[in-house]
């Protein structure tokens, strides 16, 4: 019997473990500055504001960070995930023990700034292809240990996640093809493995030329990745694939940027994967101001 795997528990574990590790590496055995200067029991309020324009992401993660330090902190998001913000706009308010606010501050900001930077960049790509049916995808080019957050930010920005890791999609790339003896052999082996293991999972194969596209179409995978095809080569490849296998999905990848994503989308591909969404992040500038509450 074929079975579809569910990874929700694994994703939750990745998120929680990464947050606790981030707090631990910053705090270790204590915030000596706060311990030395802040009287115990002082209460206050922290407000996080945007310092530049962008798309906000990471509010739920920031809340988990603050509560990871102190369960008694009250956290109040002031905008929604994915909201467009401008400089000076307050985005989150947190209230409670001042020492707890100060210990959690930088870790919460780090997550929010990176995630908001990714969401902002993703939104730019999504808006460039909005007039077409193309979907913007991320890749596995994420910061080690931060994949959950990087991919969550892409979703908040309006993109869609490609495979999370090596376990949730068969993606046959150039090295697999060369080692397996060709495109057709690799697809055939992958299909046999899934059937043997009773696994319900899509098969995607990367092709680098019209000749490999021809081989891939014979193997009838679920998705064909057109890797590093020039924009002017894509229409013919899309036409050939649609004529031969109308239901097959097509992904364009390789050297995609904001200047060429528009014409790539207009060739009729279903997906466009963009590595720079997560491997070349420009963080959104955010800051937190704390004041005492008498």
Image (cartoon, helix red, strand yellow):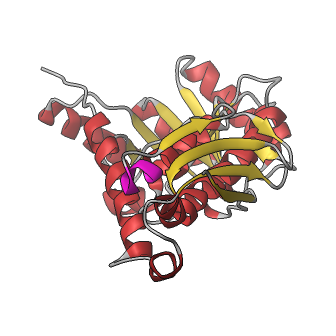
Is 50 magenta? The answer is: no
- Residue 105 placement: quadrant: bottom right
Residue 235 x/y as whole percent: 77, 34
Magenta stretch contains residue 69: yes
Q: Position of residue 101 (x, y in %)?
A: 52, 58
The picture places residue 7, in percent across and down from the top left corner, at 29, 37
Q: What residue is drawn where x is 36% and y is 46%?
A: 71
Find the magenta span and give its range: 65-70
Q: Residue furthest top?
A: 246
Does 177 appear above or below 269?
Answer: below
Up the image or down, 135 lies above or below 292; here it is above
Q: Quadrant for the N terminus, please.
A: top left
Residue at left 52%, top 60%? 98
Up-down relation of residue 279 to residue 220 (above or below): below
* Left or right: residue 199 compared with residue 121: left
Task: Determine the main secondary structure of the stretch shown in magenta.
Answer: helix
Most foreground residue, 95 or 65? 95
Q: Residue at x 18, y 22 (%)?
A: 2
Identified at 50% across, 60% down, the residue is 42
Residue 230 visible in the shown view: yes
Q: Is residue 248 left or right of residue 238?
A: left
89 or 187: which is nearer to us? 89
């Amino acid at each position: 019997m074929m079975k579809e795997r569910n990874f929700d528990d694994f994703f939750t574990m990745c998120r929680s473990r990464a947050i606790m590790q981030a707090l631990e590496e910053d705090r270790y055995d204590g915030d000596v500055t706060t311990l030395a200067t802040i009287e115990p029991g002082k209460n206050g309020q922290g407000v996080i504001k945007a310092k530049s324009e962008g798309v906000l992401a990471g509010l739920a993660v920031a809340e988990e960070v603050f509560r990871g330090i102190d369960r008694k902190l009250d956290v109040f998001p002031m905008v929604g995930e994915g909201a467009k913000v401008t400089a000076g706009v307050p985005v989150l308010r947190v209230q409670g023990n001042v020492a707890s606010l100060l210990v959690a501050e930088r870790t919460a900001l780090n997550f929010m700034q990176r995630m908001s930077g990714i969401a902002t960049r993703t939104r730019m790509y999504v808006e460039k292809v909005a007039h077409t049916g193309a979907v913007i995808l991320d890749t596995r080019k994420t910061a080690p240990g931060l994949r959950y957050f990087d991919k969550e930010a892409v979703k908040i920005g309006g993109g869609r996640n490609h495979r999370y890791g090596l376990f949730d999609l068969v993606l046959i790339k150039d090295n697999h093809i060369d080692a397996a003896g060709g495109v057709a052999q690799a697809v055939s082996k992958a299909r046999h493995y899934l059937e043997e293991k009773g696994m319900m999972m899509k098969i995607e194969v990367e092709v680098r030329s019209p000749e490999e596209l021809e081989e891939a179409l014979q193997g009838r995978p679920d998705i064909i990745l057109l890797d590093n095809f020039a924009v002017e080569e894509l229409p013919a490849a899309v036409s050939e694939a649609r004529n031969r296998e109308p239901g097959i999905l097509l992904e364009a990848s390789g050297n995609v940027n904001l200047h060429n994503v528009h014409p790539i989308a207009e060739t009729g591909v279903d997906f466009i994967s963009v590595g720079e969404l997560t491997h070349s992040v420009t963080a959104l500038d955010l800051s937190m101001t704390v004041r005492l509450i008498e």
